[in-house]
Image: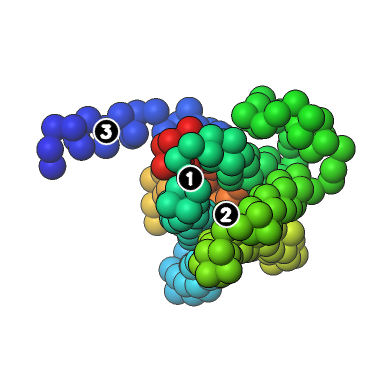
Amino acid sequence: MSDERATKFFSTLLDFHTRGTMALLLKRIAWFGLYTLVLLIVEAKYHWIPLRSDIIFASLMGTMLSLLLVFRTNTAYDRFWEGRKAWGSLVIHTRIFATMLHAMLPRADKDNRAFFAKHISAYTFATKNHLRDTFLPEELSDLDPPSLERLQLVKHVPNAIGKAIFERMQTLFRSGIFRGEDMRNMKPQYDVLLDTTGVCERIKFTPIPPSYGTYIRVFIFVYLVILPFLLIEKYELYTIPAEMFAGYILMGLEMIAEEIEEPFGLDSNDLPLDSISGTIRANVFEILEV
């Protein structure tokens, strides 16, 4: 392992507890550790253990729970990865779209070059904010003030920007700057803009059924409540770290799955949409020489 990778690895270990999900996880683990400590005190004072050690039962429940968590985590990651693929495709096709526009527009046509660069860039930022249920005019400041004012009045900002892009393409086609084959070649790249928004909306507005997540959380809670009774007789004080470690694994996987199943937010594990949108903006402005 190189020095740089080693430094990054150990710095991650040191600051992981400051992240939102991990901080909440540590609090929950601490509660189960305290719960186990209380059980140990009660057992030492009153010799009260309603459940005796049964490793087979604990292993059986753990196996069933692990299967559920694997399915839960895979389902959440599929949503995360589908969103990432959609935005990756957007990066690629906006570059292709801008390259085609650069080749087809006269170099002296600064107005149309600026229009497409600004609107393609604005479309990505508008899509990002649409998925986050926000509207940030400062991120669309490249657009002229009248266009920005009109966007503040519409419900679906990406649609309005996409419509403006296609209207300008049709105007240039009717004026003879774009030919029929040019329009046919650019249309698939334009369609990717709308497709990306549609894919991301499908992910956002089709959440995993809440009852499924609730069922797994209840199962984890019951398992962690029962587990100390099965371990106290054999492990005694070591039951506390065993309980906390089991909680770390089980609750941690559930919390990570819950976070990444909605990949368009602002959590630490969500997609870096601000960075991707900024990359697209830099790309199209550079390609179109604006």
Q: CA distance from mark 2 to mark 1?
A: 9 Å
Q: How far from the left and from the top, in percent, is residue 255? A: 57, 49
- Residue 120 seen from this side: yes
Residue appearing at x 33%, y 34% in the figure = 13
Report whether 169 appears left or right of 210. left
Question: Callout 2 environment at 10 Å: few (<14), some (14 to 19), or many (20+)?
Answer: few
Q: Do residues under tags 1 and 3 come within 8 Å of each other at their CB atoms?
A: no
**In the foreground, 84 or 4:** 84
Q: Which residue corresponds to the image point at 39% horizontal and 28% vertical from the top-left?
A: 15
Residue 153 location, x and y as percent? 87, 37
In the rendered image, which residue does mark 3 sit on? 8
Q: Earlier in the sequence, mark 2 or mark 1?
A: 1
Mark 1–mark 3 Cα distance, whole angstroms, equals 48 Å
Residue extending farthest to the left is: 2
Q: Residue furthest right?
A: 153
Name the residue at 53% across, 39% down.
109
Residue 210 placement (x, y as % from top left): 74, 61
Q: Nearer the viewer, residue 21 or 204?
A: 204
- Work out which quarter of the rendered image holds the N terminus and state it: top left
Q: Which residue is mark 2?
A: 177
User: Where does label 1 land, which residue?
Assistant: 106
